[in-house]
Image (tube, helix red, strand yellow):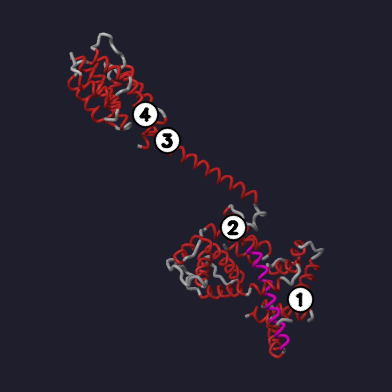
Amino acid sequence: MGSEKFDRIEAFIDGKLSEDELKEFMERLERDEKLREKLEAHKAARVVAESLAEHDLRNRMKKWKAQNTGTSDKETKGAAPKQGVVRRMISYGIAASLLAFVVGVSYLYVDSPRYASNVFAERNTGEYTHAERSVEQDMPTELRDIHQLYAAGEWESVIEGVRQYQPLSTEEEMTLDFLLADSKYRIGNIDVALGQYNNILETADDRWHIDRAEWKKVLIQLESEPFNKVYLDELEKIAEDPTHLYRKAAQELISEMRGLRFTFGRLFI
Amino acid sequence: MKNLLVLLKNGGNDRYTAQEKIYKQLRGEGCVNIIYRSIEPYRGTLHDAEDLFQDAFLVLMKKLDKGEHQDEFNAKNYLVAIARNLWKNTSRSNKVAEDYQNEYAHDASISLYCDEHLERQEKRKLVDGVINTLTDQCKEILRLWMEDFSMREIAAKLDLSSERMAIKYKYRCHKRLVKYLAGRPNLVNELNN
């Protein structure tokens, strides 16, 4: 097939023949079977060539997609490796920061209220072990035994001893009430302990016992509910009362409560 | 979009640039997600949506190459309509969610383009068989010619000494391909129908 004929067929397919050329070509096509066959072969060649272009476009699309998403598959791995690595590192960095943040917040979420409770509990038990351990030599033997049982942490025995002992004075009665309240608190009988402190507050007529009962009561309440507004107000009241015996202790506690772990606990509650 | 269509018509590197910009613009406009929402109720996956997007983009390029689009042509809506039509033709489902309507939802040209595309995919094996008979240089030269690169550009890309050499090589490859096909009337028949 000559170059001229070849080009004529191509021009026909492309629609580039002039009106006269087209007319002539159509006439020839009608009577020339070989030309018809050649035209079909040219059209099939176009299908093949178009497929080559389509295949190339598909490959480029894969590359663009990888650039767009920051991922790279087997065929695009070599095309944009640096960009992919940087993006991946940034993604991992963000993911790690988020994870650390979530873990940190979760830890504070779980730990903060527990930490707050512990602060009040430690303050409470510390107070007792110092104040109630002293054993006077001129005490009656039974009362001294109760004090020694208390110092040894035998709470059940203390409760039993208090029940059996007949106090000889109001002072002794008050001391036993405090020992009983604290022993009940130690064995986890919080409501009874609080009731006992309420009894003391109703019956006591001296400042030392009243202030002490108020202090112990607010510590036990805050241990159960560290961020309860009513209990916190009671603590503030003690801290602001210039005559209260536990004013300084209350102020120290409030200062401690301004720490990060307390603040988080307050947020989560 | 108008500028991109002009670049597309220029062919060669301009066409590459336009194709890339249109592709990224359509992806950026969330076409894959729109397609996914259409096929998801009918067992379509995100992977299917990605494939449909790629195929629909090829069909869209064919339409734009033919210059049959209106001035106010909306490529995004057209592409989504193509993808939905292609999904209807898949063996897994003949359904597609009807909640997404646009000006091309019932465009007859879409069915024609989609049918052509699916036919091309069916002939893929036959075409690949023919392509394998070509030399690597012939494959490259015919591809660049189909992508409307000028003979000067083809010469530069293939490291040929001159534009004249590019014309010569292209003619030789093209002729070889036509000759190969002319000797196989059945194959020609299958490729053209």
Q: Are the residues flagged by discs 3 and 4 from a single subunit?
A: yes
The kind of residue on which mark 1 rests is: Lys
Can you identify the residue that label 4 sits on? A118
Question: How far across and how far down the image is residue A91, in percent?
Answer: 55, 46
Secondary structure predominantly adopted by residues drawn in magenta: helix
Q: Is residue A139 magenta?
A: no
Which residue matches tag 1? B175
Sequence order check: which comes first, mark 3 or mark 2?
2
Instruction: Evaluate if marks 3 and 4 touch, with contact meaning CB atoms under 8 Å apart.
Output: no
Q: CA distance from mark 2 to mark 1?
A: 36 Å
| Residue displayed at 76% across by 76% down | B175
**Magenta-colored span:** A33-58
Q: CA distance from mark 3 to mark 4?
A: 14 Å
Number of residues whose C-alpha sits closer than 10 Å to that of mark 1, classed few (under 14), some (14–19) or many (20 or more): some
Q: CA distance from mark 4 to mark 2?
A: 56 Å
Q: Amino acid at mark 3?
A: Leu
- Crowding near pointer 2: few (<14 within 10 Å), some, many (20+)? many
Towards the viewer: A24 or B54: B54
**Mark 3 or 4, nearer chain start:** 3
A168 left or right of A39?
left
User: Is the residue A126 above or below the residue B54 in the image?
Assistant: above
Label 3 crowd bin: few (<14), some (14–19), many (20+), radius 10 Å: many
In this rendered view, identify the residue nearer to me: B193 or B75. B193
Query: Circle 4 — which element?
Result: helix
Q: Which mark's residue is nearer the viewer, 3 or 1? A: 3
The amino acid at mark 2 is Lys
- Choose mark 1 or mark 4, whichever is in front: 4
Quadrant where the image shows the C terminus of chain B: bottom right
Q: Chain of mark 2?
A: A
